[in-house]
Amino acid sequence: MTIEPVPESGTMWPDAAAPEQWSPADAALPVVELRGVCRTYGSDPPVQALRGVDLTIRAGDWLAVVGPSGSGKSTLLNVLGCLDRPTAGTYLIEGIDAAALSEDERASLRARSIGFVFQTFHLLGHRTALENVMLADVYAAGERTDRQARAQAALEKVGMGHRRDFLPTKMSGGEQQRVAIARALLGSPRLLLCDEPTGNLDTANTESVLALFATLASEGLTFVVITHDEDVAARARRAVRIVDGTLTEVNA
């Protein structure tokens, strides 16, 4: 994924600064609303990757999305991450109609409100943990003056402050994923999108990352986790299943 820079001017979200301390009452506020969202590719014949998806995700939700390969999981993640547009329906993120935004505005929204975590950690091997986290802020054109302090705080938040000067080659898989999560948290996102975040981890490191997710969710961060692992899905607060582009609730 290419990280696009935030436009230097013209930002349309006055609340783009880090959110205030979360409280349980905030759980009533939708972070994400999908209303009849469809995504169709091609025309001969068309492929319906998403079919009339309705989904509401509130502050502090930890939602697992499970389903077989080719079911529409990646398409759903791309729509949620403002990397793709619905063919039909409405996608609101914090009340903003993402489909109505220009490409620059969508890039700004991604940078300010959405963090991404992947199965492969995408850390630069020749950069320290601290430098890897800081680089995300460079790409997003964040404030330069306190960048190192904010990167250090993000590493501390995921329990990796003591590894700030280590290269990824000197870290375990779980430690590398924690650094990747710290990188995603640097911009104080409202929504964290995770694509198979434990797919490359052993049992112990998977447990460590899931415990971190539980802590962050309790603090009000909203998660969507794509996973093939039913045990990982069982740890989430909610789970939905997607098959042939159709979404159904598994538990809540």
Image (tube, helix red, strand yellow):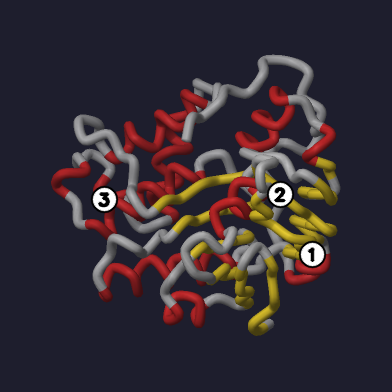
Mark 2 or mark 3, whichever is nearer to me: 2
Q: Is residue 32 left or right of residue 245?
A: right
Measuring from the top left, give residue 25's x and y in whole percent. Answer: 80, 69
Measuring from the top left, give residue 28's x and y in whole percent. Answer: 82, 68
Measuring from the top left, give residue 38's x and y in whole percent. Answer: 76, 53
Give the residue type that dot 1 points to. Asp
Residue named by callout 3: 162
246 relative to 92, above or below? below
Q: Nearer the viewer, residue 23 or 214?
A: 214
- Say which quadrant the C terminus sits in: bottom right
Q: Is residue 53 left or right of residue 180?
A: right
251 relative to 147, above or below? below
Residue 13's mark?
Answer: none
Q: Secondary structure at mark 1?
A: strand
How busy is the neighbourhood of tag 1: few (under 14 within 10 Å), some, or many (20 plus)?
some
Looking at the rendered structure, the number of numbered marks drawn on it comes to: 3
Q: Nearer the viewer, residue 30 or 242?
A: 242
219 relative to 194, above or below? below
Q: Tag 3 or tag 2, which sits nearer the N-term?
A: 2
Residue named by callout 2: 39
Q: Secondary structure at mark 3?
A: helix
Q: Tag 3 or tag 1, which sits nearer the N-term?
A: 1
Residue 54's mark?
Answer: 1
Q: Tag 2 or tag 1, which sits nearer the N-term?
A: 2
Give the residue type that dot 3 points to. His
The residue that appears at 51% across and 30% down in the rendered structure is 3
CA distance for labels 1 and 3: 43 Å
